[in-house]
Image (spheres, grey):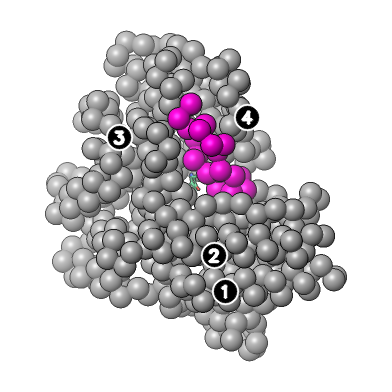
């Protein structure tokens, strides 16, 4: 059913053109995906793949979901884009729905995760600037964290390899993820904000230690710093809740969202508390495409479908099944796998030290399974939220087959 069974001619011609026209900033697999259906995608030659990556946790409703397709088509026929000189009917509806679900009263729309984090950084600077706290400029972030590729978001990203050769903007400190003592030593009245992912995604699917977010909240409050959560990867149902931080007493001042919010259509959002509503007065921030009608219609369809199809419950149920299956594979292949971890439909299979997850990807692809690498040695699974139990079972079989082949070679 899955895997490279047919010819590779069409793919080959796409690869040739890509090699001649595009920059070489990605390590792209020679698979030209042409279309998708539910949790499957098909390449130019008709080879099928079970998609357990969902475009890096973006295609939350899978591929070709009728509600999403219909919402985009209907909006396109009405109006696609109007700019922020005017209110948009669709983005105001989205604002209301999103704020209610995320339990945050205010929202700013943009186009990506990096942009949502840039908005957070500007929010922190302007907030303390207008309060007259001009020396409060420091941002605390965490080692191994990922916040995006634009220069501001890159500067708070906690992995030196991503930053190499680019320098950094501003006064930024990176602390060990989950280190309570380092936090207590570092937080002072010069810290404007602390930013953290509840589960480090790109860094290797690493959940923050139990109770850490709550502790962080208390520490931030005691020195008067803002607490920002980067839920770009973990938010919008990925772990079986609207936000991964819900239920953890994190009580953030602002939250960044993007990836899964519009089911694969580019969007980003910054949610804030009420007291930050005037921190970015007219003229201080914006985005031409922010709140774009097409993206907003897609996001509304995603939120409504998560609700109507019970996808939070599904993410929790299928996530538990996946976690159990991965844990069994760790027991079965101790020479390859060290452990597994994650929550809901954000799961990682950790390979042994010295192994590179990215070297394993072609083996998974050849067997017809799309997964991604996170950190150096984690195989990451982020299936669509619509995934069914039998598809989790099929994915686990393909992983088993791949580990079996890899362990022998
Ligand atoms: C992907 C990601 C980003 C960057 O999002 P882009 O849309 O690529 O700019 C930021 N933060 C986290 C946690 C992410 O996973």
Q: Quadrant for residue 127, please give it.
A: top left
Specify few, some or many for label 4: CA neighbours under 10 Å numbering under 14, 14-19, or 20 or more. Answer: some
Q: 170 above or below 377?
A: above
Q: CA distance from mark 2 to mark 1?
A: 8 Å
Q: Name the residue tied to disc 4.
A: 176
- Tell me the SS state at disc 1: helix
Closer-to-camera residue (353/82): 353
Q: Nearer the viewer, mark 3 or mark 1?
A: 1
Q: Which residues are magenta?
A: 196-216
Q: Is residue 246 above or below residue 81?
A: above
User: What is the secondary structure assignment of the residue under circle 2?
Assistant: helix
Q: Give the CA separation, mark 3 to mark 2.
A: 34 Å
Checking the image for residue 393, the label placed there is 1
CA gap, disc 4 and disc 3? 26 Å
Q: Is residue 395 left or right of residue 354?
A: left
Residue 325 appears in the figure: yes
Among the two numbered marks 2 and 1 on one chain, the one whose residue lies closer to the N terminus: 2
Of tags 1 and 4, the one toward the viewer is 1
Q: Residues within 10 Å of mark 3 (few under 14, many from 20)?
A: many
Residue 89 locus on image (x, y percent): 14, 54
Q: Quadrant of the C terminus?
A: bottom right
Residue at mark 3 to residue at mark 1: CA–CA distance: 39 Å
Residue 402 is marked as: none
Q: Which residue is mark 3?
A: 272
Disc 4 to disc 2, how far (Cα)?
Answer: 31 Å
Residue closest to the far right: 409
- C-beta proximity under 8 Å, tags 1 and 4: no
Label 3 or label 2, whichever comes before in sequence order: 3
């Amino acid at each position: 059913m899955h895997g490279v069974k047919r010819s590779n001619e069409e793919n080959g011609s796409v690869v040739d053109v890509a090699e001649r026209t595009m920059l070489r900033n990605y390590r792209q697999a020679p698979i030209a995906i042409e279309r998708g259906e539910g949790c499957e995608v098909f390449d130019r030659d008709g080879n099928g793949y079970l998609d357990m990556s969902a475009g890096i946790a973006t295609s939350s409703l899978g591929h070709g979901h009728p509600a999403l397709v219909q919402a985009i088509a209907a909006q396109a026929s009405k109006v696609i884009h109007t700019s922020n000189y005017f209110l948009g009917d669709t983005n105001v509806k989205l604002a209301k729905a999103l704020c209610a679900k995320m339990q945050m009263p205010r929202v700013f729309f943009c186009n990506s995760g990096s942009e949502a984090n840039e908005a957070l950084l500007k929010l922190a600077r302007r907030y303390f600037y207008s309060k007259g706290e001009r020396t409060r400029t420091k941002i605390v972030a965490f080692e191994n964290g990922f916040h995006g590729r634009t220069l501001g978001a890159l500067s708070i990203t906690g992995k030196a390899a991503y930053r190499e050769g680019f320098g950094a903007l501003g006064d930024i400190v990176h602390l060990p993820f989950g280190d309570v003592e380092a936090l207590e030593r570092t937080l002072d009245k010069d810290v404007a904000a602390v930013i953290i992912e509840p589960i480090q995604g790109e860094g290797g699917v690493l959940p923050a230690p139990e109770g850490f977010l709550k502790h962080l909240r208390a520490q931030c409050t005691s020195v008067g710093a803002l607490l920002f959560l980067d839920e770009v990867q973990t938010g919008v149902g990925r772990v079986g809740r609207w936000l991964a931080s819900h239920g953890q007493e994190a009580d953030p001042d602002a939250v960044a969202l993007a990836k899964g919010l519009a089911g694969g259509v580019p969007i980003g959002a910054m949610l804030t508390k009420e007291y930050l509503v005037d921190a970015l007065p007219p003229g201080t921030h914006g985005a031409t495409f922010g709140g774009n009608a097409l993206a907003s219609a897609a996001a509304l369809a995603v939120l409504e479908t998560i609700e109507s199809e019970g996808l939070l419950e599904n993410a929790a149920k299928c996530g538990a099944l996946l976690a159990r299956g991965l844990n069994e594979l760790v027991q079965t292949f101790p020479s390859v796998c060290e452990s597994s971890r994650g929550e809901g439909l954000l799961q990682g299979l950790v390979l042994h030290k010295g192994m590179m997850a990215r070297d394993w990807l072609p083996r998974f692809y050849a067997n017809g399974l799309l997964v991604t690498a996170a950190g150096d040695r984690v195989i990451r699974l982020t299936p669509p939220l619509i995934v069914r139990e039998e598809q989790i079972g099929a994915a686990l079989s393909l992983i088993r087959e791949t580990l079996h082949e890899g362990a022998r070679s």
